[in-house]
Amino acid sequence: MKAKIFKAAEADWIEAPGHHSAFSKLLINETDGSKYFDFRVSSYQPKGYCEVHTHQIAENIYYILRGEGIMELDGQRHLVSPGTVVFIPAGVEHGIANTGFEDLIFVVAASPPQDMPRPE
């Protein structure tokens, strides 16, 4: 395993399965040699969303940078906006949607990375 340094602009935007008008840059994951983390930045256009789903093993942490939206956790809806931190243990149903007027931008860290959605 080697250290890596790069600019986020070098990574392509992808739209993973179950994501709609919702794009992510996979910045660090197992393809980079990470055994423990998946780290990405996401940008959801207005009306963009990720379908409600669960991860059997991975824990997720979301940090909202810009915009507003709704995070659903086990059927409960929560308003998220800049500065909101969301911790999602394995097995919790969750999804996020941009209900605001500008792009919803956030970072996601997950561990372990093998349980995270990948592009088709």
Image: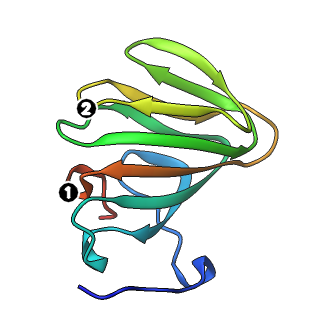
Q: Which residue is mark 1?
A: 114
Instruction: Say which amino acid is labelled 2.
Output: Ala
Q: Is residue 103 above or below residue 76?
A: below
| Secondary structure of residue under mark 1 | helix
Which quarter of the picture shows residue 48? top right
Of residues 119 and 94, the one nearer the viewer is: 94
Q: CA distance from mark 1 to mark 2?
A: 13 Å
Q: Which residue is mark 2?
A: 90
Residue that appears at 25% across and 43% down: 58
Residue that appears at 71% across and 37% down: 83
| Secondary structure of residue under mark 2 | loop
Instruction: Say which amino acid is labelled 1.
Output: Gln
1 and 2 marks in contact (CB < 8 Å): no
Which quarter of the picture shows residue 33? bottom left
Q: Is residue 110 above or below residue 49?
A: below
Residue that appears at 52% across and 41% down: 62
Give how far across and how far down residue 8 sits, in percent.
59, 77
Residue that appears at 36% across and 49% down: 110
Q: Which mark is residue 68?
A: none
In-image side of 72 versus 52 (left or right):
right
